[in-house]
Image (cartoon, grey):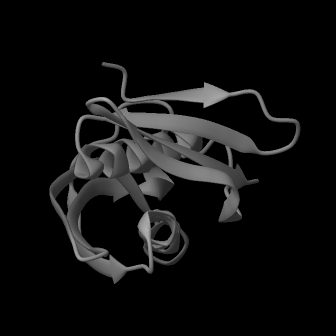
């Protein structure tokens, strides 16, 4: 199963991510956001643990991705992988592994995650999430 795919959008970056579980689709959304910033191999040299919550799946995903952008903007952190991701009662914890973004040539700077066209749905045995990033 593919992890994510980018879709056509007039001005921003739009993607869909896929997973067998809610955790996997959140992880793949994080990887898609990272791929929008830099589309090469990222070394695993820095680790952050994050915790956030939301009122529903969409706000939880929004807050989770905003945490990644916050780390990128404030700590120069570029995500390589997500480990130990747990979602329970609209709260998420995850261990983020990556490197200093200053060592990479960033291709696109993301201003924000948006709620525009955002959804998370489960069909049969697969979750699909869609996100638009403001660039």
Vertical order, 130 against 49 (above or below): above
Res 105 seen here? no
Q: Can residue 51 be seen in this view?
A: yes
- Outermost residue on the left side: it is 84
**Residue appearing at x 68%, y 45% in the figure:** 108
Q: Position of residue 85 (x, y in %)?
A: 18, 59
Place of residue 22 in the rendered image (x, y in percent of width and height, measured from the top left): 28, 50
Position of 60 compared to 62: left or right? left
Viewer-closest of 95 and 46: 95
Judging depth in this view, the residue of 105 and 93 nearest the camera is 93
Extreme front residue here? 124
Percent across and percent down for residue 65 are 47, 63
Residue at 32%, 54% in the rendered image: 99
Q: In this view, does 134 lie to the left or right of 40?
A: right
Q: Please name whichever residue, 77 or 134, is drawn nearer the observer in this view of the structure.
A: 134
Question: Looking at the image, is 70 positioned above or below residue 78?
Answer: below
Which quadrant of the view contains residue 125? top left
Q: In this view, does 4 lie above or below 50?
A: above
Quadrant housing residue 14: top right
Q: Name the residue: 71% across, 64% down.
A: 111
Q: Residue 100 at what x, y percent from top left?
A: 38, 59
User: Farthest residue in the top direction?
Assistant: 1
């Amino acid at each position: 199963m593919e992890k994510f795919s980018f879709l056509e959008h007039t001005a921003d970056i739009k993607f869909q991510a896929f997973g067998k579980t809610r955790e996997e689709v959140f992880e793949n959304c994080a990887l898609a956001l990272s791929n929008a910033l830099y589309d090469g191999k990222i070394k695993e040299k820095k680790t952050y643990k994050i915790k956030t919550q939301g009122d529903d799946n969409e706000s939880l995903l929004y807050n989770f991705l905003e945490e990644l952008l916050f780390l990128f903007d404030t700590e120069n952190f570029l995500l390589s992988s997500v480990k130990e991701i747990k979602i329970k009662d609209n709260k998420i914890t995850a261990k983020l592994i990556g490197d200093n973004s200053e060592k990479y040539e960033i291709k696109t700077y993301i201003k924000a995650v948006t709620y525009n066209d955002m959804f998370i749905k489960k069909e049969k045995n697969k979750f699909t999430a869609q996100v638009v990033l403001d660039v």
